[in-house]
């Protein structure tokens, strides 16, 4: 996956298309990401000995990584990324729009 935790992404499909958000969590094995404020679902909860408020709460649901695009931190555009290895063997992501190393 090209998307990592704390990346800012643009949603390109689904009901939140066009919105931006920060990645809170990634699920590499499922190819899904959890993005702040995106793909909100309503959850009905019951109070568990006062520990939690009963009622309906809204929370994010993970969405498919193919529905988001990484926003480049350098040029601020939705970017396709490629991987490059540095001299010390570290793998970094490169923005295909501006050519800058993102990490
Ligand atoms: Zn860029």
Image (cartoon, rainbow, N blue to C red):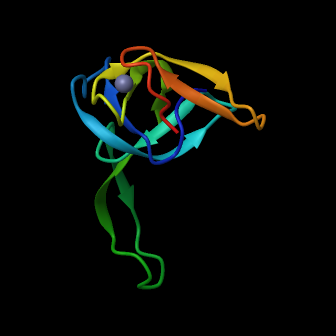
Q: Residue 78 occupies which quadrant of the picture? A: top left
Tell me which residue sits at (54%, 31%) in the image: 32
Task: Give residue 46's position: percent from left, percent from top.
Answer: 41, 67
Q: Nearer the viewer, residue 18 or 82?
A: 82
- Quadrant (top left, top right, bottom left, bottom right) of the N terminus: top right
Instruction: Note whether 23 is above or below 2 in the view shown.
Output: below
Q: Residue 29 occupies which quadrant of the picture? A: top right
Residue that protrudes farthest toward the front in the picture: 87
Task: Give residue 60's position: percent from left, percent from top.
Answer: 37, 46
Q: Which of 99 and 10 is in front in this view?
A: 99
Task: Give residue 8's position: percent from left, percent from top.
Answer: 36, 39
Q: Residue 53 occupies which quadrant of the picture? A: bottom left
Instruction: Note whether 39 is above or below 13 in the view shown.
Output: below
Q: Is residue 22 visible?
A: yes
Q: Is residue 61 visible?
A: no
Residue that protrudes farthest toward the right in the picture: 89
Give the quarter the ligand 1 occupies: top left
Tell me which residue sits at (48%, 18%) in the image: 66
Tell me which residue sits at (47%, 34%) in the image: 102
Tell me which residue sits at (37%, 30%) in the image: 72
Instruction: Note whether 44 is above or below 12 in the view shown.
Output: below
Residue 67 appears left or right of 86: left
Q: Which of 69 and 86 is in front in this view?
A: 86
> How many circles with numbers are drawn on the protein?
0
Task: Give residue 3's position: percent from left, percent from top.
Answer: 52, 32
Q: Which of 12 and 6 is in front in this view?
A: 6
Instruction: Note whether 61 is above or below 66 in the view shown.
Output: below
């Amino acid at each position: 996956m090209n998307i990592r935790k704390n990346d800012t992404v643009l949603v390109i499909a689904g009901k939140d298309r066009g919105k931006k958000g920060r990645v809170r969590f990634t699920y590499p094995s499922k190819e899904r990401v959890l993005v702040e404020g995106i793909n909100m679902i309503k959850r009905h909860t019951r109070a568990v000995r006062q520990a939690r408020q009963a009622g309906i709460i809204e929370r994010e649901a993970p969405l498919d990584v193919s529905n988001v695009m990484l926003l480049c931190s350098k040029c601020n555009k939705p970017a396709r990324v490629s991987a490059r290895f540095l001299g010390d063997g570290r793998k970094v992501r490169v923005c295909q729009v501006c050519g800058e190393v993102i990490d």
